[in-house]
Image (spheres, grey):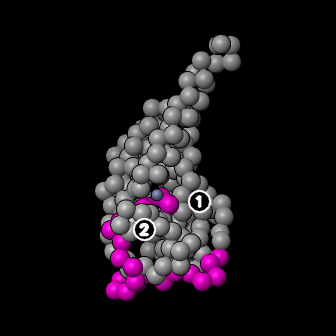
Amino acid sequence: MFTEYRIDRSSRITWVCRNWDESTTRNGATRLTSASVIGRRLWDFVSGRDTREYLEALFHWSRGHDVPLHIAYRCDMPDEERYYRMSVCSTGPDEVGVSHRLLQRIAAPDPPQFSSHDGQESSARCSVCCRYKIGDTWVDPYRTGQHMRMSGPFTVCGECRNTALETIRLSLSADISKRQGPHSP
Ligand SMILES: [Zn+2]
């Protein structure tokens, strides 16, 4: 499964891929048709200020550099873990392209239950790795089997922030090498 969209400098969606409607329908997001998202700001569809700032940092970096950023993330379904790769790259002077590729699905034989009124309470959820913060620890309910109460805001955990910084650092090195060309030492 592969989807792609492009945003302008104000993070307004300017273009979506041809299979957009088919993909959103398959994922159950039937209201997010191409006609309804083009022209809207991406932030209308992103939960949590921290998640927005995280994405803004990636987009901002991509606008100034000529190499793509690749970020691994999870977006689980109730009965399976889903591993994706998001790629962000400049596609024009004022435009950034964002693509999402499904890499792996792992069916959960005994999936955790998610409820608004029952289960383990958490203080935050990471939008990138899908873990929940319980006390000082980030846990993966698909591993622990804990039933989760849907509480706490979306954020980005420290581990995912560090991974993104490391990704930017490596991409910066690649960009510098690219600009220097093959004849530089
Ligand atoms: Zn995380």
Q: Position of residue 160 (x, y in %)?
A: 47, 52
Q: Position of residue 135 (x, y in %)?
A: 35, 67
Badge 1 amino acid: Tyr
Residue at the spot of label 2: 132
The one of 110 and 31 positioned closer to us in this rendering: 110
Residue in view at x 54 percent, y 63 percent: 74
Q: Residues within 10 Å of mark 1 (few under 14, many from 20)?
A: many
SS category of the residue bearing label 2: strand
Badge 2 amino acid: Tyr
Position of residue 51 in the picture relative to residue 65 (left or right): left
SS category of the residue bearing label 1: strand
Pick the quarter of the image with the C terminus.
top right
Residue at the spot of label 1: 84
Some atom of ligand 1 lies within 8 Å of the CB belonging to the residue at label 2:
no
Magenta segment boundaries in residue numbering: 107-129
- Please identify the residue farthest to the right as the structure is shown: 182
> Would you identify the image quadrant in which residue 73 lies?
bottom right
> Would you identify the image quadrant in which residue 117 lies?
bottom left
Badge nearest the viewer, 1 or 2: 2
Of callouts 1 and 2, the N-terminal one: 1
Residue in view at x 44 percent, y 48 percent: 161
For residue 30, above or below residue 52: below
Position of residue 41 in the picture relative to residue 147 (left or right): left
Q: Position of residue 81 (x, y in %)?
A: 59, 70
